[in-house]
Image (spheres, rainbow, N blue to C red):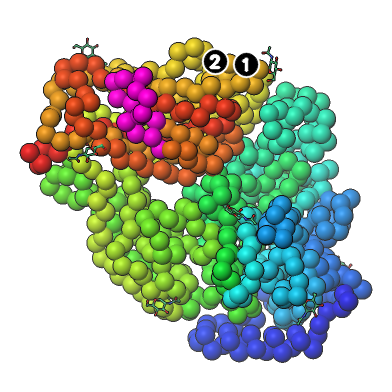
Amino acid sequence: MGSVKREVLLGIALKFLLVIQSSCAGAAPSNQRICKSNNDDDDSMYYPPVQLHELEDHVVLDNGILNVTLSTPGGMVTGIEYNGIDNLLDYNNEENNMGYWDLVWSSPDHPHDVFDKLDGTNVYVVIEDESQVELSFVRMWNSSQTGLSLNIDKRLVMLRGCSGFYSYAIFERLEGWPDVNISQGRIVFKLQQDLFQYMAVSDDRQRIMPTSEDRKYGLVLDYPEAVLLTNPANEFLRGEVDDKYQYSSENKDNRVQGWICSNPPTGFWIITPSNEFKNGGPVKQDLTSHAGPIALSMFFSTHYAGAPLILEFRHGEPWKKVFGPVFIYANSAAQGEDPLTLWTDAKEQMLAETESWPYDFPLSKDFSFAEQRGSVTGRLLVRDSYISAERLIAGSSAFIGLAPPGEPGSWQQESKGYQFWTEADEKGYFTINNVRAGNYSLFGWVPGFVGDYKYDAEISILPGCKIRLGNLIFDPPRNGPTLWEIGVPDRTAAEFFVPDPNPTLMNQLYISESNNRFRQYGLWDRYTDLYPDQDLVYVVETSSFQTDWYFAHVNRNIGNKTYIATTWKILFNLTSVDESANYTLRLALASAHEAELQVRINDETMIVPSFTTGLIGKDNAIARHGIHGLYWLYSIGIPSSCFLSGDTNVIFLRQSRGSGPWSGVMYDYIRLEAPSPMNN
Ligand SMILES: *[C@@H]1O[C@H](CO)[C@@H](O)[C@H](O)[C@H]1NC(C)=O
Ligand SMILES: *[C@@H]1O[C@H](CO)[C@@H](O)[C@H](O)[C@H]1NC(C)=O
Ligand SMILES: *[C@@H]1O[C@H](CO)[C@@H](O)[C@H](O)[C@H]1NC(C)=O
Ligand SMILES: *[C@@H]1O[C@H](CO)[C@@H](O)[C@H](O)[C@H]1NC(C)=O
Ligand SMILES: *[C@@H]1O[C@H](CO)[C@@H](O)[C@H](O)[C@H]1NC(C)=O
Ligand SMILES: *[C@@H]1O[C@H](CO)[C@@H](O)[C@H](O)[C@H]1NC(C)=O
Ligand SMILES: *[C@@H]1O[C@H](CO)[C@@H](O)[C@H](O)[C@H]1NC(C)=O
């Protein structure tokens, strides 16, 4: 049952090597790869060969730097021996609860979410030589089974001289297989809590973390993930809030994160060398490491976005996607050396891994090597004659990406395909490298401008192609000159007023004036403290959005867990109303959760609002301390007859769905445009 299939393995390994040699002409054969480690000494000859030891129901991979133990054929990581520590993982847990892949799915037969740890039923040795061992833990589906209609192939790779190991997976559905929803996919590692107490998710977000006992003996706040630490073992943590959602990151920023043990100085890191396999694009947020101590690699989820990101398979849709590899990196420092140097070293390793992407060693035929990929270059320019009448504006720092074909902006709700994103330079030039062969739309957006860009034609990437698109012109939505604006069009609410947290519900990490203050717990209720009975009023001539525009349009807490709808007012003067045509209100939202935003002009009592979004959003970004969720843009025509000439006008913004603390919207940016003089 647990025995490793050796006959099969030879065939598979040979076949795969052949594939590699034919497609990577001129490239170094994969078995000569030299691991780019942080060691000055880069020659793999000095490192012992990788060895695979087969035990009754386990295998151990050993490269002299670390040993990794996996269950067979399940493929659960049950041991990581490193730096004199027998097991970095929490060996008090069950065997399938230390290091594992999992998916969350549902189907007509299983309507409730199933947490599936993807136990393999067969294990294959894909390659076993001195420089690389690759294992494949497989679970195949067939139509005589119920359950998740998906073939699972979990891979684990250990290279010679590499202080860590790689994991990736190939998930596949064949045509005609039954309906299924898959809402989440990830790798989880549960570390020993006696060892790992310090967590780092970025340069400015790292700290000593509470233990799971600290959480257990604390006070659960408004949802189970948020706990007030009333009784922590470490006095330093008393009175703080711990909530895993306070450590979320955007895909583009989640490149290395993990844990540090101070004695012996040891680090455990998850390094993500590419975001191509993640869902929802570069600013999709997701969980990272958090109290437990848990180290996570989230591949896709509905977090900060909602149901549209569920992978729904209907009508027998076939599908295949490679997730990863990600690198699980272990590092160590000399006794007495500052353990924080491990963070610095992990960042260097992340850069080295990123540079060697796409990797040349994974042996799944579905992994795409550098030679099988193509690139796209160009320059994005913005045409907005109300900002620059004569010249096109450089698409400075624009986000440009290739994603499965769709409408402008569709990438933010896309989970099935691959996405390739880059940031343009200050002149708008961009290069997207290492794109897998296939057909894509080219999407983009430019900080400082509303709306989504999409290139007219579909882009077909062939192996080795270099597509030069030249100058691309983005016409952001615009009907006339700006009368006034609130905020900055950048898809977040970060520039608005973010209050101090309730002093009894703080996370020390986010107290200082940093750009992370929105990550505090309970800010939704601070609105009621600041606006106990009157709602927010913004006077265009005298208010400033940094201090006078609350970052989230939330409900008022009137006590006893009752929340009521609120109406914000924007006051402004129009010296003379242009009767010729419509004014345009651009309403860009950075987030919406179970919300309905209604717009009324100069008459709050209108039963039918001038405009309503209808019920929108389920990104839960208010509860989960995200400063944005999905992006929404509304362009609302307002007949000039609605406005008063030479007098104060009022726009009423009502979020009409009261009900709870977390329903509401975050604004990205609001602009009122006059009718275009050119239409006269
Ligand atoms: C790996 O396991 C072998 C056999 O038990 C042991 O001799 C070796 O020291 C271990 N290596 C590491 C890096 O822990
Ligand atoms: C799958 O997801 C869709 C959309 O989220 C939902 O309407 C449907 O009920 C789900 N189906 C199952 C079986 O969970
Ligand atoms: C289908 O899966 C079942 C359960 O794993 C297995 O017993 C059976 O042999 C499989 N049938 C085929 C045709 O592969
Ligand atoms: C891409 O589109 C072209 C033309 O529409 C089509 O022939 C080709 O099969 C597509 N390629 C892929 C990988 O879907
Ligand atoms: C609070 O709400 C509960 C349930 O809705 C109700 O039974 C209770 O009387 C309310 N208490 C106060 C003080 O209003
Ligand atoms: C509008 O103009 C009037 C008259 O100049 C002035 O009294 C009022 O304060 C102004 N209102 C706003 C909102 O600026
Ligand atoms: C003005 O806006 C109204 C309401 O949105 C719309 O029905 C009308 O067609 C617009 N008129 C013009 C001239 O654009």
Residue 59, x across and y down, in percent: 84, 71
Which residue: 66% across, 17% down?
Answer: 560
Q: In the figure, is residue 311 to the left or right of 578? A: right
Residue behind mark 2: 529
Image quarter of residue 17: bottom right
Residue 382, x across and y down, in percent: 25, 51
**Badge 2 amino acid:** Asp
Which residue: 84% across, 51% down?
Answer: 90
Q: Is residue 103 visible?
A: no
Q: Is residue 469 visible?
A: yes
Whether residue 520 is situated above or below residue 59 in the rendered picture: above
Nearer-N-terminus badge (1/2) = 2
Residue behind mark 1: 559
Does the magenta-highlighted stretch encompass residue 600? yes
Q: Quadrant of the C terminus?
A: top left
Residue 554, x across and y down, in percent: 51, 27
* Label 1 vs label 2, nearer the camera: 1
Residue 57, x across and y down, in percent: 89, 71
Q: Quadrant of ligand 3?
A: bottom right
Question: Under 8 Å from ligand 5: the CB of mark 1?
Answer: yes
**Badge 1 amino acid:** Gly
Which residue: 64% across, 85% down?
Answer: 16
Which sits in the foreground, 606 or 13?
606
Q: Which residues are magenta?
A: 598-613
Which sits in the foreground, 93 or 645?
645
Dot 2: few (<14), some (14–19), or many (≥20) neighbours within 10 Å? few
